[in-house]
Image (cartoon, rainbow, N blue to C red):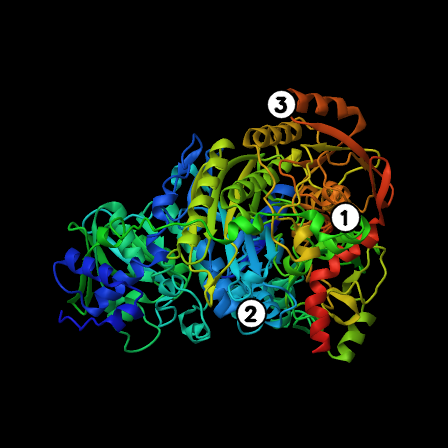
């Protein structure tokens, strides 16, 4: 399977995603420069973390205009799996591929730490290998991760089961203390209505090896692999 | 070049003495013009010339079989095997951080990162050593909050993890905080690039941010004391742009791979002046530039302003003639524009033109190697003799061990720095093997089986009481910290923070500290490959505690064998390596409980220290040691508690009371004394004998003192229980103390 990891100027988790996919998962990945206009033969796209264009205006606000984003939008519209991690999630929000917006963390500080999220939905390309309700210990590292959307949008997300990850305590309880940034409904990650575009603030790519503290995040990438194989086997059998 | 009148007030504004001016005239054979005077003033400032410190720094050990680059370049480098080099350095940004905490600290981070990637290394870790006044002071809280946010703001955005460091508090830093930033990068040993200009006719390129009026005379500011007017110096602080630096980092590393460069240097202190003259001087060449070609952010800048600007995120490159197009193409990809501003010449001079007209012409060596060097007068400070007296009996009855234990855990110097490091991205690049706040920082080296352990340390109280011993203790502690992680100390960098060197007492502190640090590093076989000196750390005539910070790099051959400080399993045996004596001089206990900084620092036998560190390294490599933690501020009791906190385990300990305890203070000295050359390690019961034998063979005392288990921290002395705390409760005190200063007070405000 081949992943495309988009590199915006200011991306700084691009190599981490690349490392997780190639060295840990053993799959192929290309680093795709933001000025490129094609994703070539990628089976899945990752928008990595970082500070694209410095994030001086609003997180992700400039990156959405990078030439590659037109290709990402087409890829998503065709049902291709797209994962936005942290800054990548913010870019997806700005690009309108996911609903809502990010506010400053409620304590106004950048926060970096391991915490727990619960997998709420397993019918997305990036959670297909998870157990429903599975807990993952993964780190966050952001200053603007306070997810906000209009009440009706939040209601729709919940109704459509588009909340994919939620911040929870180590025992899995959805508490205010477990919420690191003030996100509504403890939302850590969501998907679009078609369920192929997923964004999350935590960094699964930083939690793929026990040596660096946790391997719980690897399942996100394994999910993409499982999803890809099942999609291709369906296509191969001519059922589609 | 019409000379401008150089009056005494002009000289004073430039921080030059009259005899230095006379020397300039003699060197040039004529009066300098104002631009030339400005160039001399920044290059001959203490910050750039090391004029007071150089005679002493020359005595430090700087060589060794692993040293690939010693002092004199942008950073030092040591061989870590597999054809790779660790490139590292520490630098101060104290003065700017007091004036404008966020930008001062942020640009300090930016500057040290540039020093590392300038050498062709990809930066993989940042650490910092910070000092502030008392957190009870709102000004100090504001300064600390700003510094922490600035460090995070820059490091987080550029994507280099801040994996460790240390923070100390003392009244002397109230108006003069210390912000020392350490960066380490990895390069191929045979691809290290130097800051040199050579090859007549090779073009000189400028790349990065445009030049503005920010930071003019920053180097001069950093070479003077503060007074009540210091806030007026705000325009001399630069503003950082981590995004620009991220582009520069990636673009420069890409250019370096193309073999198109002769040399490269960042523009830090003294900006364009320093980079041109230093590169020329190192290459034995001349450099000619035309400032009208320099990209400018503001209009009507004079040659003086352009040469002295300290605008951030700028690099100077000497490109191989004929390869210009390749270099320009790579920078274009990153939306950076490399501009040719001059070329290398034969005459060894820095020649500055403005629209073709020569506005300054100075021999490069006069600005660098031939800058003034002083052997300043020294005197033993008057305070020393009285401060070294410690009469415990006169202090009355100490608080109970239980009370002292709790107070020490909450003391800002000892309490968890979580509120701070949580604001730093410490995991980006996915190499962080040990999270911050848990002993030495540690990062793996991808593509190899190795890891590096990193520690920055200094106890200013010890240095104040005895600069020679204190600096030795700093070196011993930093290397002991990396040894605890299983790292063999292979190189060091230092950042020497002192007061006004023109005061003989301060100069004495400095000279004695350098001697002590040199002696320690020689004995421990750790070459010092570079560093930084920050003098004039004074406000209203009062100096900071002498603070010679040292950063040590340790090499762990097998990253899987890294040792952490947390106890690992119930039933493991806790062993004390080293010996406890009745040593409360300069301790956190005396400072916290009695507000006293007195006595003599703990004795240090460097041969014993070296032997003890070898046991730590060999014990880790052999897989004998399950956890290890150095004993420092707060003594054995605090060390044991910290080993429990990280694991949520408990411990049951029985210590022998110190043999030479003062009546009434025997328990205190046993629990909270800060004897050097000690570490608490844990081993599985089956491996105890092997470890004890290993230690005995090395002549290192190794005494089993208890067992890991339960959920309480229980410590007895000679069978008598003196501390009994639930681990979680003690941890809560330790973990919330610093954050409470910020969150609670903000809520009240």
Residue A225 makes an appearance in the image: no
Mark carried by residue B698: 3
Q: Earlier in the sequence, mark 1 or mark 3?
A: 1
- The C terminus of chain A sits in image quarter: bottom right
Mark 1 or mark 3, which is nearer to you? 3
Q: CA distance from mark 2 to mark 3?
A: 62 Å
Q: Secondary structure at mark 1?
A: helix
Tell me the element at label 2: helix
Q: Chain of mark 1?
A: B
Q: Residue at x 18, y 70 (%)?
A: B355
State the residue position of label 2: A64
Tally of numbered discs: 3
* Residue B279, percent from left and from top: 28, 51
The residue under label 1 is B645
Q: Toward which corner of the image does residue A153 lie, by quadrant?
A: bottom right
- Give a yes or no on whether discs 2 and 1 share a subunit: no
Q: Chain of mark 2?
A: A
Q: Position of residue B325 (x, y in %)?
A: 29, 55
Q: Is residue B377 left or right of residue B638?
A: left
Could you say which quadrant of the image residue B324 lies in? bottom left
What subunit carries mark 3? B
Of the pair B649 and B124, the residue shown nearer to us:
B649
Q: Nearer the viewer, residue B331 or B88?
A: B88
Residue farthest toward the front in the current orientation of the protein: B394
The image's mark for residue A61 is none
Distance between mark 1 and mark 3 Cα atoms: 31 Å
Which class describes the residues within 10 Å of circle 1: few (<14), some (14-19), or many (20+)? many
Q: Judge the density around disc 2: few (<14), some (14-19), many (≥20) Cα neighbours within 10 Å.
A: many
């Amino acid at each position: 399977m081949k992943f495309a990891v988009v590199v915006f100027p200011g991306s700084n988790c691009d190599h981490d995603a690349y490392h997780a996919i190639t060295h840990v998962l053993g799959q192929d990945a290309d680093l795709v420069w933001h000025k490129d206009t094609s994703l070539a033969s990628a089976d899945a796209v990752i928008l990595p973390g970082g500070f694209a264009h410095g994030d001086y205006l609003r997180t992700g606000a400039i990156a959405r205009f990078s030439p590659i984003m037109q290709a990402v939008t087409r890829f998503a519209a065709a049902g291709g799996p797209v994962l936005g991690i942290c800054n990548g999630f913010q870019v997806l929000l700005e690009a309108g591929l996911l609903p809502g917006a990010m506010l400053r963390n409620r304590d106004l500080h950048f926060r970096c730490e391991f915490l727990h999220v619960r997998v709420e939905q397993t019918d997305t390309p990036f959670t297909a290998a998870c157990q429903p309700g599975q807990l993952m210990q993964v780190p966050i590292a952001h200053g603007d991760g306070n997810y906000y959307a209009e009440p009706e949008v939040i209601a729709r997300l919940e109704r459509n089961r588009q909340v994919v990850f939620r911040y929870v305590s180590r025992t899995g309880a959805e508490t205010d203390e477990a919420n690191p940034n003030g996100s509504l409904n403890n939302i850590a990650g969501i998907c679009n209505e078609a369920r192929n575009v997923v964004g999350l603030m935590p960094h699964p790519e930083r939690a793929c090896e026990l040596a660096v503290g946790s391997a719980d995040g690897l399942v996100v990438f394994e999910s993409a692999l499982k999803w890809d194989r099942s999609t291709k086997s369906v296509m191969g059998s001519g059922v589609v | 070049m019409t000379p401008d009148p150089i009056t005494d007030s002009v000289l004073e504004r430039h921080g030059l003495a009259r005899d230095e001016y006379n020397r300039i005239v003699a060197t040039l054979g004529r009066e300098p013009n104002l631009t030339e005077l400005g160039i001399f003033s920044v290059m001959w400032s203490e910050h750039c010339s090391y004029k007071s410190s150089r005679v002493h720094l020359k005595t430090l050990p700087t060589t060794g079989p692993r040293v690939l680059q010693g002092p004199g370049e942008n950073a030092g480098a040591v061989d870590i095997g597999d054809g790779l080099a660790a490139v590292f350095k520490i630098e101060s940004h104290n003065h700017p951080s007091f004036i404008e905490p966020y930008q001062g600290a942020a640009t300090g981070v930016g500057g040290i990162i540039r020093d590392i990637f300038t050498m062709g290394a990809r930066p993989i870790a940042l650490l910092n050593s910070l000092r502030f006044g008392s957190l009870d002071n709102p000004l100090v809280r504001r300064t600390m909050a700003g510094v922490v946010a600035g460090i995070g703001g820059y490091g987080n955005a550029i994507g280099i993890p801040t994996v460790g460091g240390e923070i100390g508090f003392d009244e002397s830093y109230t108006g003069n905080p210390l912000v020392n930033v350490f960066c380490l990068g990895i390069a191929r040993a045979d691809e290290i690039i130097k800051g040199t200009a050579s090859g007549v006719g090779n073009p000189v390129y400028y790349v990065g941010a445009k030049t503005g009026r920010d930071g003019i005379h920053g180097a001069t500011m950093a070479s003077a004391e503060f007074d009540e007017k210091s806030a007026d110096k705000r325009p001399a602080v630069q503003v950082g742009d981590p995004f620009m630096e991220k582009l520069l980092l990636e673009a420069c590393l890409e250019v370096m791979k193309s073999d198109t460069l002769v040399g490269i240097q960042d523009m830090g202190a003294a900006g364009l002046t320093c980079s041109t003259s230093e590169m020329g001087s190192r290459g034995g060449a001349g450099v000619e530039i035309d400032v009208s070609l320099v990209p400018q952010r503001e209009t009507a800048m004079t040659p003086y302003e352009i040469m002295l600007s300290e605008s951030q995120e700028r690099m100077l490159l000497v490109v191989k003639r004929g390869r210009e197009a390749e270099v320009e193409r790579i920078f274009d990809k990153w939306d950076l524009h490399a501009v040719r501003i001059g070329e290398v010449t034969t005459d060894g001079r820095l020649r500055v033109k403005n629209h073709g007209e020569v506005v300054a012409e100075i021999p490069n060596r006069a600005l660098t190697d031939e800058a003034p060097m002083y052997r300043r007068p020294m005197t033993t400070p008057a305070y020393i003799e009285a401060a070294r007296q410690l009469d415990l009996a006169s202090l009355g009855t100490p608080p109970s061990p239980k009370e002292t234990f709790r107070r020490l855990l909450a003391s800002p110097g000892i309490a968890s720095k979580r509120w701070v490091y949580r604001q730093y991205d410490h995991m980006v690049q996915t190499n962080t093997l040990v999270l911050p706040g848990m002993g030495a920082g540690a990062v793996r080296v991808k593509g190899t089986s190795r890891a590096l352990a990193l520690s920055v340390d200094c106890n200013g109280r010890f240095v104040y009481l005895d600069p020679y011993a204190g600096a030795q203790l700093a070196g011993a502690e930093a290397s002991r910290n990396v040894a605890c992680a299983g790292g063999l100390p292979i190189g060091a960098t230092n950042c020497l923070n002192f007061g006004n060197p023109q005061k003989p007492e301060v100069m004495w502190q400095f000279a004695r500290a350098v001697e002590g640090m040199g002696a320690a590093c020689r004995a421990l076989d750790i070459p010092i490959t570079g560093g930084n000196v920050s003098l004039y750390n004074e406000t209203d005539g009062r100096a900071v505690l002498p603070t010679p910070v040292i950063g040590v790099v340790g090499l762990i051959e097998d990253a899987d064998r890294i040792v952490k400080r947390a106890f690992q399993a119930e039933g493991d045996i806790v062993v004390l390596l080293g010996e406890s004596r009745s040593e409360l001089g300069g301790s956190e206990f005396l400072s916290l409980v009695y507000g006293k900084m007195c006595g003599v620092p703990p004795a240090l036998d460097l041969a014993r220290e070296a032997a003890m560190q070898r046991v730590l390294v060999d014990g880790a490599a052999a897989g004998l040691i399950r956890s290890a933690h150095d004993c420092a501020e707060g003594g054995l009791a605090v060390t044991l508690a910290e080993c429990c906190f990280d694991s949520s385990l408990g411990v049951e300990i029985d210590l022998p009371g110190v043999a030479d305890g003062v009546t009434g203070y025997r328990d205190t000295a046993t629990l909270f004394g800060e004897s050097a050359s000690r570490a608490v390690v844990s081993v599985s019961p089956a491996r105890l004998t092997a470890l004890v034998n290993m230690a005995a063979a090395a002549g290192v005392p190794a005494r089993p003192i208890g067992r890991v288990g339960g959920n309480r921290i229980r410590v007895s002395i000679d069978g008598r229980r003196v501390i009994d705390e639930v681990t979680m409760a003690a941890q809560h005190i330790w973990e919330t103390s610093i954050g409470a200063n910020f969150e609670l007070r903000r809520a009240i405000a």
